[in-house]
Image (tube, rainbow, N blue to C red):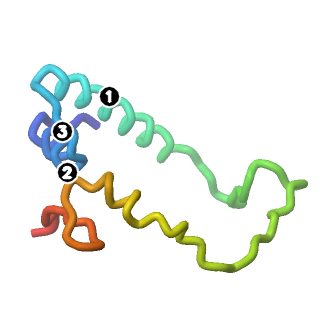
Amino acid sequence: MSLDLATTRRIAKLARIGLDDQEIEAVRTQLGGILGWIEILDEVDVEGVPPMIGTSTHAALKPREDAVTDGDCQEKVLSNAPDREGPFFTVPKVVE
């Protein structure tokens, strides 16, 4: 599957990645390669293969305490926001 330049530009815009025309072409090629691999994976027959949970059947999941751990670092997190309104991120509308 290959992407057209308009779709690649839209993806870059939604991801808020500023790319010039030369970079758009390179990203289009890379995304096309990734989508090609995904298409190949769709051809794999996984009928009867149980889902894998973790990489080792010997490792038990370590239980943790069920507690709120927000870190109390709201201002630090919001400092990365390109735009904010009070204690919230503001983002452009992406669904029309």
Residue placed farthest to the right in the image? 58
Closer to the camera, 16 or 7?
Answer: 16
Whole-percent x, y for residue 68 in the image: 60, 78
Mark earlier in primary sequence (2, 1): 2
Q: Is residue 60 left or right of residue 7?
A: right
What amino acid is found at the position of numbered circle 1 in the picture? Gln
56 relative to 70, above or below: above
Q: Determine the secondary structure under disc 3.
A: helix
Mark earlier in primary sequence (3, 2): 3
Mark earlier in primary sequence (3, 1): 3
Total number of numbered discs in the rendering: 3
Residue located at (72% from left, 59% from top): 53
Q: Quadrant of residue 89?
A: bottom left
Determine contact: label 2, label 1, CB under 8 Å: no
Q: Quadrant of residue 44?
A: top right
Give the quarter of the figure containing the C terminus. Answer: bottom left
Determine contact: label 3, label 1, CB under 8 Å: no
88 relative to 52, above or below: below
Residue located at (37% from left, 63% from top): 75
Closer to the camera, 86 or 32?
Answer: 86
Return the mark for residue 18: none
4 relative to 51, above or below: above
What residue is disc 3 on? Answer: 8
Whole-percent x, y for residue 1 in the image: 29, 37
Residue located at (15% from left, 43% from top): 7
Return the mark for residue 14: 2
What residue is disc 1 on? Answer: 30
- Label 3, residues with CA under 10 Å away: few <14, some 14-19, many ≥20: some
The Cα–Cα distance between marks 3 and 2, rounded to whole angstroms, is 10 Å
What amino acid is found at the position of numbered circle 2 in the picture? Leu
Q: Determine the secondary structure under disc 2.
A: helix
Between circles 2 and 1, the one closer to the viewer is: 2
